[in-house]
């Protein structure tokens, strides 16, 4: 009887300690970069920066308000900035710093200077 109780306790405890997938582990959604541009200390920011990768993953649906058409990387005041083109929103371009915080850039020349050389992501519909 004592053996059965110990065995039962062992079964119960082992069921609570099963290997569960760690929810904090980042599993990137692979994105093919258009240009090889390093930013924020990463060689492949689209796939190595968690917040950016999640934005792209969630922004794949053209019917969603968070749909992303383009992403550029450009230096602004010495810092790497991600400019995300949200065509379905009123603000259209949203500049983000390396930590994923939206920042205020009102310099129109900065946005006008964005080029294909700065482009790292462009939405391509699946055919």
Image (cartoon, helix red, strand yellow):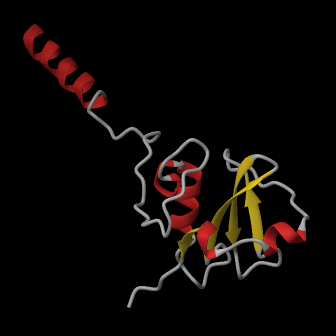
Residue 96 picture location, percent across and down = 73, 55
Residue 64 in view, yes or no: yes
Residue 18 placement (x, y as % from top left): 26, 32
Number of labels in the image equals 0
23 sits to left or right of 54? left
Considering every residue shown, the one lying at the far bottom of the view is: 127
Taking depth in this image into account, of 4 and 105 the one nearest to the observer is 105
Could you say which quadrant of the image residue 23 lies in? top left
Left or right position of 75 against 91: left
**Residue 24 drawn at (x, y percent):** 47, 39
Which corner quadrant of the image does residue 25 belong to? top left
Q: Nearer the viewer, residue 110 or 46?
A: 110
Say which residue appears at 11% left-offset and 8% top-offset.
Answer: 2
Residue ID at (18%, 25%): 11
Instruction: Please give the name of the residue rendered at 80% of the width and 71% of the height, measured from the top-left corner.
Output: 111
Figure quadrant of the N terminus: top left
Q: Name the quadrant of the C terminus.
A: bottom left
Near-viewer residue (14 or 80): 80
Quarter holding residue 69: bottom right
On screen, 79 above or below 74? above
Q: Residue 123 or 75: which is nearer the viewer? A: 75
Residue at 44%, 64% (x, y): give it: 31
Residue 68 visible in the picture: no
77 is higher (above) or lower (below) than 65: above
> At which x and y percent is residue 37?
54, 57
């Amino acid at each position: 009887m004592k053996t059965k109780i110990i065995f039962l306790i062992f079964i119960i405890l082992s069921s609570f300690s099963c290997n569960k997938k760690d929810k904090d582990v980042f599993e990137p959604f692979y994105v093919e970069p258009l240009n090889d541009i390093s930013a924020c200390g990463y060689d492949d920011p689209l796939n190595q920066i968690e917040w950016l990768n999640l934005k792209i993953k969630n922004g794949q649906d053209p019917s969603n308000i968070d749909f992303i058409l383009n992403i550029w990387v450009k230096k602004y005041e010495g810092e790497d900035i991600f400019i995300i083109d949200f065509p379905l929103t009123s603000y259209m371009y949203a500049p983000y710093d390396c930590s994923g915080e939206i920042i205020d850039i009102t310099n129109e020349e900065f946005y006008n200077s964005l080029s294909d050389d700065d482009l790292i992501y462009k939405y391509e519909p699946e055919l």
